[in-house]
Image: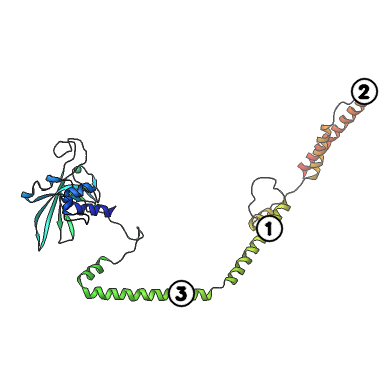
Amino acid sequence: MTKDISLKAACADSFYYPQEWKPSRGSLDHFQRKRGFEHHFGKERTKNLSKGVLLIRFEMPFTVQCVRCGLYIHQGTRYNADKKKVGMYFSTPLYEFSMHCGNIVSPENSANGRAHCNQRLVIRTDPKNDDYELAEGLRRKVETWDNKDSETLELVDPETRRRMQADPMFRVEKTVRDMQQERNHKERLSDLQDLQAEREDTYGWNCVLRKAHRTRRKEEQRQEEEERRRGKPNFGVPLAPACEEDSLQAKSVEYKTDHDKMEVSVRRSSLMAQPVLEQGFHKKATRVAALVAKRKRLQQSSRMERCRKRVS
Ligand SMILES: [Zn+2]
């Protein structure tokens, strides 16, 4: 794509004569236009030639922003631009390219109250710095990134690059040194690979791994068996592992059972649970009498119990 654009730009400059063109095939403009290249300005191209202005297709060399409407004009965007020679830097001519921003905006924001922004954009070549100078209506979009973030190689730091440009001897030395370093790195890497291959013991590693796996599997099986024997727990709360402190605390507590009292309460509850009336009249009567007697005895015994406790 870029190649095509560059070729188109070269064709637009009219310094390029394609191999297929012959004078018998008409003018170069006519020929190129028929091939679909954008050299279609015709008479417009040289309209202001008397003022030293040639109409060309200009391609934005880097991403810039229009100062009026704030539109980002990306690298490779093409414009019809007036090309004009504005000076010399030693033997190199300085060119100025002027064009107009074509972004559609509201008339209040437009430079001349029209539908388009129409801000005049002027760029000059700057051979001194190998760059372009943004003369009017544009500001450069500064794109900075860290080589580590973009995961690319940092070739040389700016200071070294400057010294390499300034001092040919330093450049040669640095190149030779880098080559030597690279050779050393390669030799070291191959030595390390050999060493690793020599010391590699796949059988031993395999044995160790298999043994470790076997032990772990046996342990897992033992735990599963243990759980299976123990059965399901009675409640869903997982138990914390036993600890020394808890067992000591549990041992320190002593429970004492009052067996006499328990016996009395058991007897009383069993009697209370018995049905008071039974089938058959005489049976009933004897039963009631017996119950009354029992209750009396119980009441007496419980009273005596209480007295004994009070005394003791
Ligand atoms: Zn604009």
Q: Is residue 302 left or right of residue 232?
A: right
Give the residue drawn at x 52%, y 76%: 198
Circle nearer the N terminus (3, 2): 3
Measured Cα–Cα span from mark 3 to mark 2: 111 Å
Instruction: Check the image and report above or below for 267 versus 244.
Output: above
Asked if the beta carbon under badge 3 is closer than 8 A to the nearest atom of ligand 1, the reply is no
Give whichever of discs 1 and 3 has the lower sequence position: 3
- Asked whether, in this view, residue 292 is left or right of residue 113, the answer is right
Going from N to C along the chain, the mark reached first, 1 or 2, is: 1
Q: How is the image coloured?
A: rainbow
- Residue 220 position in % (x across, y down): 66, 58
- Report ligand 1 position as a quadrant: top left
Tell me the element at label 3: helix
Horizontally, residue 306 falls left or right of residue 69, namely: right
Q: Residue tagged by mark 2?
A: 281
Mark 1 to mark 2 CA distance (whole Å)? 70 Å
**Residue type of the residue flagged with mark 3:** Leu
Residue found farthest to the top: 281
Q: Are marks 1 and 3 in contact (CB under 8 Å)?
A: no
User: What amino acid is labelled 1 in the image?
Assistant: Gln
Q: For marks 3 and 2, give the one nearer the viewer.
A: 3
Residue 18 sits in quarter: bottom left
SS for tag 2?
helix
Q: Position of residue 307 (x, y in %)?
A: 79, 40
Depth check: give the residue in front, 312 or 229. Answer: 229
Front-lying residue, 58 or 229: 58
Which residue bears the numbered disc 1? 221
Q: Which residue is mark 3?
A: 192
Q: Mark 3: few, some, or many residues within 10 Å (few <14, many ≥20)?
A: few
Q: Residues within 10 Å of mark 2 (few under 14, many from 20)?
A: few
